[in-house]
Amino acid sequence: MDLIRNGYMIDPASGIEGKRDILIEEGKIKCITEHYEGEAANIIDAEGLVVAPGLVDGHVHFRDPGFTYKEDIYTGAAASARGGFTSVIMMGNTEPHMDNPDTLKYVLDKGKSTGIKVYACANVTKDMQGKELVNMQEMIDAGAVLFTDDGKPVMSEEIMRKACENAAKVRKIISLHEEDPKLITDNGINAGPVAEKMGITGSPRQAEISMVERDIKIAMETGAEITIQHISAAESVELIRQARKTYKGIHAEATPHHFTLTQEAVLKYGAMAKMNPPLREESDRQAIIQGLKDGTIETIATDHAPHASYEKEKGLREAPSGIIGIETSLGLGVRELVEPGYLTLKELLERMTVGPARLYGLLAGELKEGADADIVIFNPKERAKYTSSLSKSSNTPFLGQEIPAVIYYTICKGKIIYSKY
């Protein structure tokens, strides 16, 4: 048996917050008590540290199969463990796509040997072409936990409606990338003064707003549950806020980069601040923070999106969109949301643990007796310079920054999968 002693436990699921000892046996939490008197083979003294459920990310790109020069499941998992994550859901814009049981089996089998819990989506449409729906029940039987064509919106209203009807029958969520390509000349940069200064047209906010508006309506009419991914516009936040007053099947996620940065970051970081949907205005950033504060936005997800250095160096127009983020997510949440007083640490952790776990039906995100011992131990006040990544890629504007919430240990199923020592 192993013991975590003297830690300040925060478990958003139960509401417990205070000093606790946690006894672990055969990968499970055997006992949570204010003071454990018995013996233990191994002891972690967590005095002065927070002990919380292992973090859960509902939106990562590990690029495997097909693009393993950017990332693979092993390196993605290693970066996840360093970031405090014990459960992640892989997106399906791989090659081949996750539109068939064989690809899903490959991903899930490989994920089992990583040390963390790797879950996977299935695509909504075959080959992510938006024309023919996958067999949802077949993909659920193969292990899919949600459906998404992330990276592409489902443009056909008829296809989207049928997908929602099918998803409602199998009781799974469709997670949606909401950008209408017909309205976008140059993706990854907000249409506005910064884009103009860079000599490009950019991506207008209406590209997101119009799709969010359409898909809320379809979901409400069909009884489906949807998640609006990586929300970026204030109007989208308000559409979700109003919809949730009468229908709780509308969900949203926010990324750390969207609640931390604005379009001005492109002037400083160039393609390292290019992502879809783009960073927008300060008023949008504040709207996302308020959405997280009042529960309109229920989860924080990284949209961890690795790219090779030479790809990001191609120039603003040619460089791919996206940044890595799984190692900096907790720290940015503490720095941008907790330290300014927008959220308590327990509220932040809720949006990064039990919130996404319950949304997608994962056995994760809680500290309770009998549950898997998935645990992160960190110091929310201690800062460290972020100088390198365990990911294969380093495409992030946050390299070199002092970031709080230094992680001491990440534990999954009772095994230490990351230690700062």
Image: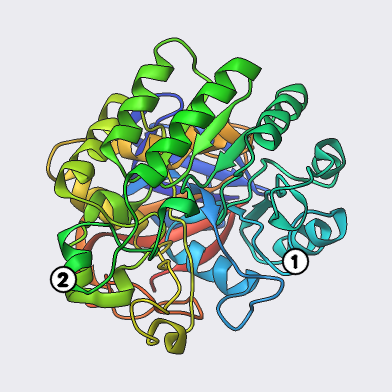
Q: Nearer the viewer, residue 152 or 206?
A: 206
Which residue position is annotated with label 2? 197
Looking at marks 2 and 1 on the same chain, the residue that comes earlier in the sequence is marked by: 1
Which residue position is annotated with label 1? 110
Residue 362 falls left or right of residue 352:
right
Q: Nearer the viewer, residue 193 or 290?
A: 193
Q: Which mark is residue 102?
A: none
Residue 356, above or below 68 = above
Instruction: Name the spot of residue 413 as percent of width and height, x first.
Output: 63, 51
Instruction: Name the spot of residue 102 as percent of width and height, x first.
Output: 87, 60
Look at label 2 and name its amino acid.
Lys
Look at label 1 and name its amino acid.
Lys
Q: Residue furthest left?
A: 340
Q: Nearer the viewer, residue 191 or 371?
A: 191
What's the CA distance linking mark 2 and mark 1? 45 Å
Instruction: Name the spot of residue 386 as percent of width and height, x first.
Output: 28, 74
Residue 278, above or below 196 = above
